[in-house]
Image: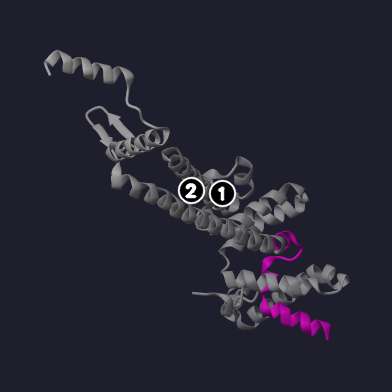
Amino acid sequence: MNESLFASKIKKTLDTGLDIGPGAAARLKAARERALERHRVPAAEFALTGRGMGVLRVGGVAQSWLRILVPAACLIAAAIGLQQWQETRQAARFVAQQAAEIEEVDTLVLTGDLPIKAYLDEDFQSWLKQASQ
Amino acid sequence: MAKASLAIALWLCLGTSLAFAQTNKQSPSWAQLSAEQQRILAPIQGEWNKLDPVRKRKWLGIAQRYPKMTPEEQERLQRRMQEWVTLTPEQRRAAREKYREFELLPQEERQAMRQKWDQYKEERAAQDASKAAATGKPAEEATAASGPAPNPPASLIKQ
């Protein structure tokens, strides 16, 4: 077989195409996709660019870890923040309650007829008792 | 995901700053008070920054009630504030308790209390004068020697 004859046979085969059934075609397609999937370069999750910084790419195993760690850290931080906020609110409520209780009495003591000394003078208390007897 | 992380971080920052703002609101410094509050609370200006949040809040509450008080009550409040803040916590507690006791008395007795106090003071003054006459010392010295009766009892003073 000379060269030109061989070439014309190949041309003829390529022009008519292979006679592949639909099942085989589907299997070939799936195999090709699997092979491509294995060799695909992981896409960068994010890239930070800046003057003189170059490009930071994160992918592969590091990316999977980040996918777990970052949300977990955020959740922990949020939980701590929430707890502190609640503690602050509780403290504020306690302060308000205590202050309201003594505010009422103090206002009355400070604006009433009797001077403060009268409430603190033990002799006056005894004198009152004697006077009432 | 980066956006979600950023949102959470921003939320945390906001929460923290709100918490700080809340703390600041609870314990404002003298400079943070309004001009009106400063005017009413002027007698305790020197003590203000030493007060704990509970006491500051109480004084702010009293300042809020101030405009509704009668001129006489306002004058009494201004006059007694300084004395009140310099008392020990035990003395203030004792005064509050005594006030509550007096509140339980019948109304006539409560109303007559001021009169009784004046009467008591007069009697004490007369006693001191007679002591002074007996010892030949001026009344003030005699009072000092016999102990400061109208002052808080020594048992209530901390130091």
Instruction: Check residue B44 in the rendering and tell me which mark sits there, or answer none.
Output: none
Q: Is residue A3 left or right of residue A103?
A: left
Q: Nearer the viewer, residue B19 or A29?
A: A29
Magenta highlight: main SS: helix
Q: Type of residue at label 1?
A: Lys
Assess whether mark 2 and mark 1 are in contact (beta carbons under 8 angstroms): no
Amino acid type at image mark 2: Thr
Q: Nearer the viewer, residue B85 or B50?
A: B50
The residue at which mark 2 appears reads as B16
Percent of width and height locating residue B15: 51, 47
Tell me the chain of label 2. Answer: B
Instruction: Please check the rendered image and state whether residue A117 is part of the magenta-colored stretch, yes or no.
Output: yes
- Quadrant of res B95: bottom right
- Residue A59 position in % (x across, y down): 30, 41
Residue beneath label 1, please? B25
Residue A52 located left or right of residue A21: left
Numbered disc 2: secondary structure: helix
Whether residue B83 is visible to the viewer of this picture, yes or no, is: no
Over which residues does the magenta segment extend?
A107-133
Distance between mark 1 and mark 2 Cα atoms: 14 Å
- B78 to A1, vertically: above or below: below
Image quarter of residue B3: top left
Q: Residue at x 50, y 44 (%)?
A: B11
Q: Residue at x 74, y 71 (%)?
A: B100
**Figure quadrant of residue B79:** bottom right
Q: In the rendered image of this protein, does residue A17 appear above or below residue A57?
A: above
Q: Position of residue B76 (x, y in %)?
A: 71, 56
First in residue order: circle 1 vs circle 2: 2
Q: Give the side of residue B131 with respect to residue B112, left or right.
A: left
